[in-house]
Image (tube, helix red, strand yellow):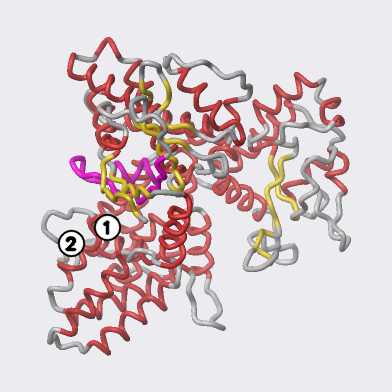
Amino acid sequence: MIKSVSQTPLYALLSADNNIIYDIPPYQREYSWGKDQWDALFDDLLEEDSDSGHFLGTIICVNKTQDAAAQTVLELVDGQQRMTTLSLFLLALYKELSARNELLDEDQKSDLTNLRRMLCLKDPTRQRLQLQKQNCNSDDYVSLLVEAGFELQKPKVTYVGVRRISKALVHFGKRIGSHLEATPGSEVSELLSLYGRVKRSILVKLEVENHSDAFVLFESLNNRGLPLTPIDLIKTSLLSVADKGSDISVENAYEAWSGWLEALGDDYGSQERFFRQFYNAFKNDWDLAVQGVSIATRSKLIRVYEELLKGDLKQFISRMEIATSAYGRILGNREEGKKPQALDDLLLDLSRAQGAPAHMLLLFLLVNDARLGLSTNDLEEITKLLTNFSVRRNLTNTPPTYDLDRIFMSIIDRVSNLETSVEVLSTIREELKAVSASDDVFATQLRGPVYDDNSAATRFVLVALAKESMTKESLVDLWAKEAVGQNKEQFVWTIEHILPQGENLPKSWIAMLGGKEEAASIQRSCVHNLGNLTITGFNGTLGNKSFEEKKERKDQAGRPVGYRNGLALNADLLEVSSWSKEQIDTRTNVLVERALARFTL
């Protein structure tokens, strides 16, 4: 069934020495990766040692070559999201290096040529990655290559910039620009370093004879025979050490392990993050440092715990019990029926604000609260501060994600020997302010298309502003969810674009905004801005209603799901009879000022 298996760096898959084309068949879904996956790839590559290849998983190909002398065509049955994203990352780097062509020496120009060949073959010029046509994926990608200087026939396609392919390229361009600003030294050298990290990333290429074999293999990998995770291997190592005659029996080791996972919950991402953050948080305080591992990354996790398990197993298990209990509280995994405290609600807010990187610092503080003299009120204040920091960071990307672990480890080192809570609080505040974006930068980001940049962070901002005006009598849970279908949930309260975001604006909106062209222009410039966003009850038909209909809309049960829903956030919308760019800009400025006050450091 499997014709060949190879663990191959990206530069070999796209080598200038071969003529391989990767074709995405039309039955594949359109490109769907978004900001979270783009950032994860960028940050993982930066986090990895510069001379190592970051493992990116598996691709499955069917050889569809008809004329091997002309080119080898491999149809991507699985892996199109990764290959598309990697190609867009490479294209972003190509554009940046091409813009600095006059600064390149001969060897660097050779690197640029090789990068060009990774994206397109020549004689004739054609792209290495042939995307499917759904949602203009193929045309958009070719258009971007043409704009970057590749001699391809430009497709007749419009609105390229509003779709995901272009947004990915723009996002990588912004991330590269931010990275260059934050990195001293030669921009060319740093760009080539990034290029090196991308091209050395590792993929396992499985080549099969036909589609039948490909789908059987795909199903096997994804549904039946999932490869062992680092957590599985750490568990195996723990039980193996216990079985080899330690003071802890295999039964007790397994019981301890089960207790840890019960505290952490069944989300694999949270489990893996804990094992990384445990080492990073207590590496110095508990003398856990593994030689050559300054920070526990995903690729080093197994090695770290293999070394830790060589030490005092009884002490290790005891420490893990303490740490997993604290981390479980951070994650909101409480005993059934136990009433949450104020701190628990604030910890939940931190998670909602995408503040998981800050869990490392809170883990250290919760475990060492008595030693550091921290009261519950102190921990509440620190959690609020970390939530505000996370919101600002997630909207400005300052500091960059790949720096967060080191920043929190540095804070831990600074506070570990302090003796009073006042010193701890002031040190944490001082460190976070030093690495955060200024109020001016935060405000600028808030005035832009925040929903498009980070919809989750934008939702958190809107919910926080809406809650400011609530009393005990009017308190509403804006994070509540309800079941929809089997094993699915949706928010009861959702973000609503006042001016609709869809391409086909209803006639009422076109007339209100001054005609089709003017309406489209306003939509492109500010539809995702804070002033055009609010919170309403979930209603799938609300989006394209007229402005007046949106005010009074009710669901089938008679509940108001329009702007007359009792939220003070919508009060200003009830006072006007039309909606314009000027009103969006005015409301944006008002909400930005409120957000600056709410998310202060």
Q: CA separation, marks 2 and 1? A: 9 Å
Which of the 4 image quarters holds residue 500?
Answer: top right
Residue beneath label 2, please?
Answer: 284
- Work out whether residue 113 can be spotted: yes
Residue 133: x percent and y percent?
58, 33
Closer to us: 565 or 423: 565
Q: Position of residue 410 (x, y in %)?
A: 25, 51
Q: In this view, does 256 lie above or below 418?
A: below
In this image, 161 relative to 519: left or right?
left
Picture layout, residue 289 above or below residue 523: below
- Nearer to the camera, 333 or 208: 208
Residue 327 colored in magenta in the image: no
Residue 513 x, y percent position in the rendering: 80, 25
Q: Is residue 323 above or below residue 219?
A: below
Residue at figure coordinates x 61%, y 18% from the top left: 156
Disc 1 marks which amino acid? Ile
Mark 2 against mark 1, which lies toward the viewer?
2
Amino acid at circle 2: Asn
Callout 2 touching callout 1 (CB < 8 Å): yes
Q: Could you tell me which residue is drawn at 33 percent across and 63 percent down?
A: 421
Q: Using residue 479 as the reference point, say whether residue 219 is left or right of it.
A: left
| Residue matched to label 1 | 412
Question: Looking at the rendering, in which quadrant would you find the N terminus?
Answer: bottom left
Q: Label 1's element?
A: helix
Q: Residue at x 53, y 57 (%)?
A: 352
Q: State which tag comes first along the sequence, 2 or 1.
A: 2
- Residue 191 badge: none
Tell me the magenta residue range. Answer: 40-63
Q: Is residue 448 visible?
A: no
- Give the image location of residue 85, x and y in percent: 43, 38
